[in-house]
Image: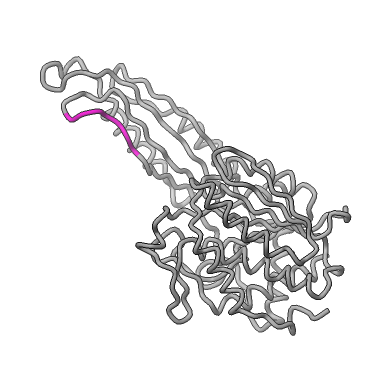
Amino acid sequence: MASFIDCRIDSSTILDRIESITRIESPTSDPAGVNRVLDVIEGWFADTGATLDRAAIDDRFGDMLRVRSDPTRNEPGILILSHVDTVHPIGTLAGALPLRREGDRVYGPGIYDMKGGLTIAVAAFRQLAREGAGRSLPITFLFTPDEEVGSLASRKHIEAEAAHCRYVLVTEPKRNGGKVVTQRKGTGRYEIRAHGRPAHSGGNHDKGRSAIRAMAEIILAIEGFTDYARGITTNVGKVRGGTATNVIPEHCVIEADLRVCTMEAAAEMGARFQGLRTTVPDVEITVTGGLNRPPYGRDARINALFAKAAAIYERVGQKLESDALTGGGSDGNFTAAMGLATLDGLGVAGDGAHTNHEHLLYSSIEPGVRLMLGLMQTLE
């Protein structure tokens, strides 16, 4: 069997596959689009000897696809995590972000995060299948439909599958010039509701109790929780409330984001969120939510896995670096918190995730496939 060093990698064909699923817009909110992407991915495994198991896991989302290289082998193996949902709304391809290539850059919604990454992982597996996969550990792929909204339905399936694996490889995109990810902050989501008393703002202003005024205090308090020195950040990202400009608003709702480095900080911030109050009389404040993804800390197992990956990359003439602690969460947060050797950011290099300049670098396809293939071939 040809090794990851001297096998032939056809980057042009792999890009064609990446583009084929990028042309299918698949925001999390469109289960049909997600499922059309899965239809294509299923076809990529048709001649590999793998077994496929596809199932609906939640009415709100598309299906989840599990692919196993050899279900008859019971030893702990390699779990490869990928998501097929994206954030760009339907119509982005025809408008703000058309699929196109400009030199080394290939643009498109979700092409960097993470349709490029999942495709190079499948390409590596297909290379193994063509030449005989017997030397590798058993490999399991999970393609999930809801990562971009916190893996609300897929988390339990990810954790259940990971419990039977030794290594976890996550095909999120590389960061900051092609660096992989070995640590991430934990993420939290909170919803805060204020319930006041409506009144006509002209005739009975003094009778009203403004939910929006009360929420303004809450928003400032939440923003004040940010502590850069400790790696804690908060953000109020959505606000809605009121019914008309001449009515004292009875209701106001906000959604807030939290990022923390440790479980201790998560507990502390959870208490601070639950303790939010207003000085506006007769307004009720209700807080729901909490930590969504635990912190992904770098430990000895992750260090050892990164060292193996760096050695593989060096043999193909590349230097592998790990990015600094990042605030963006992934499904790797779940498996790292389980104590599993987890290496993230193994997808394509590029930039602009979730923006209208999202792109991958064509030059990152071949080394990315070789790194994935090397891990599949050499992890023991």
Q: Position of residue 97 (x, y in %)?
A: 39, 64
Q: Is residue 31 above or below residue 284?
A: below
Q: Position of residue 370 (x, y in %)?
A: 69, 76
Q: How many marks?
A: 0
Residue 186, image x, y percentages: 56, 47
238 left or right of 83?
A: left
- Residue 29 visible somewhere in the drawing: yes
- The scheme the figure's colours follow is one colour
Q: Per the image, is 242 magenta?
A: yes
> The C terminus appears in which quarter of the rendering?
bottom right
The quarter of the image holding the N terminus is bottom right
Instruction: Look at 66% across and 56% down and name the residue there.
Output: 81
Q: Is residue 82 magenta?
A: no
**Which residue shows up at 77% across the image and 71% down it?**
128
Q: Return the residue nearer the eye: 364 or 219.
A: 364
Hey, which residue is sitting farthest left in the picture? 203
Residue 133 lies in quadrant:
bottom right
Q: Is residue 342 above or below residue 248?
A: below
Residue found 47% across the figure and 43% down from its top:
258
In the picture, measured across the screen, residue 84 lies left or right of residue 46, that is left
Q: Which residues are magenta?
A: 239-245
Residue 324: horizontal and vertical position, in percent?
55, 63
Q: Nearer the viewer, residue 198 or 46?
A: 46
User: In this orientation, does residue 308 appear?
Assistant: no
Residue 119 vs residue 79, the one in the foreground: 119
- Seen in the picture, residue 230 relative to 268 is either above or below; the reply is below
* Nearest to the observer: residue 370 or residue 206: 370
